[in-house]
Image (spheres, grey):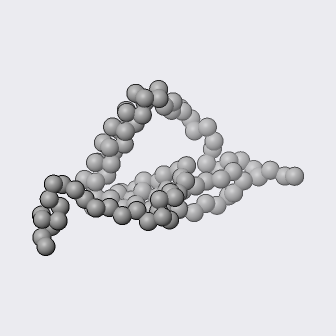
Amino acid sequence: MSEEKKNKGGKINIELDESVAEGTYSNLAIINHSVSEFVVDFVNIMPGRPKSKVKSRIILTPQHAKRLLKALGDNISKFEQAHGEIRDYDKAPMPLNFGPTGQA
């Protein structure tokens, strides 16, 4: 069956695995790009831990990166209309290294 017939009406069938549905927490995104792609690494940095690992990497074409930017902007606008302005910080509330580790 051709793609046109399968996607008649513009509907797309997307499956979401249980493990993916749980999501992954990230409090840092590192974005790099080349001529042909954008690479977004999502990291979870925790206080007192000098080393963190990339939890997820998403690779996008420049066109999809721009669509993502627009979609995020639209969703942030809708969120703020419903819940009020999201405050941004001039300076990050926590430095990336979180300072020295605590002692008991």
Residue 6, image quadrant: bottom left
- Tally of marks: 0
Q: Is residue 19 visible?
A: yes
Instruction: Choose between 82 and 58: the one closer to the eye.
Output: 82
Q: Position of residue 91 (x, y in %)?
A: 56, 35
Q: Position of residue 7 (x, y in %)?
A: 17, 61
Where does the N terminus fall, quadrant-wise?
bottom left
Instruction: Choose between 68 and 39: the one closer to the eye.
Output: 68
Instruction: Choose between 29 and 35: the one closer to the eye.
Output: 29
Specify whether 48 is left or right of 70: right
Specify whether 36 is left or right of 29: left
Specify whether 52 is left or right of 37: right
- Residue at (12%, 70%) from the top-left corner? 2
- Residue at (50%, 57%) from the top-left corner? 23
Instruction: Choose between 56 and 83: the one closer to the eye.
Output: 83
Q: Is residue 73 above or below residue 20?
A: above
Q: Is residue 34 visible?
A: no
- Residue at (32%, 61%) from the top-left corner? 14
Q: Position of residue 36 (x, y in %)?
A: 27, 61
- Residue at (84%, 52%) from the top-left corner? 103
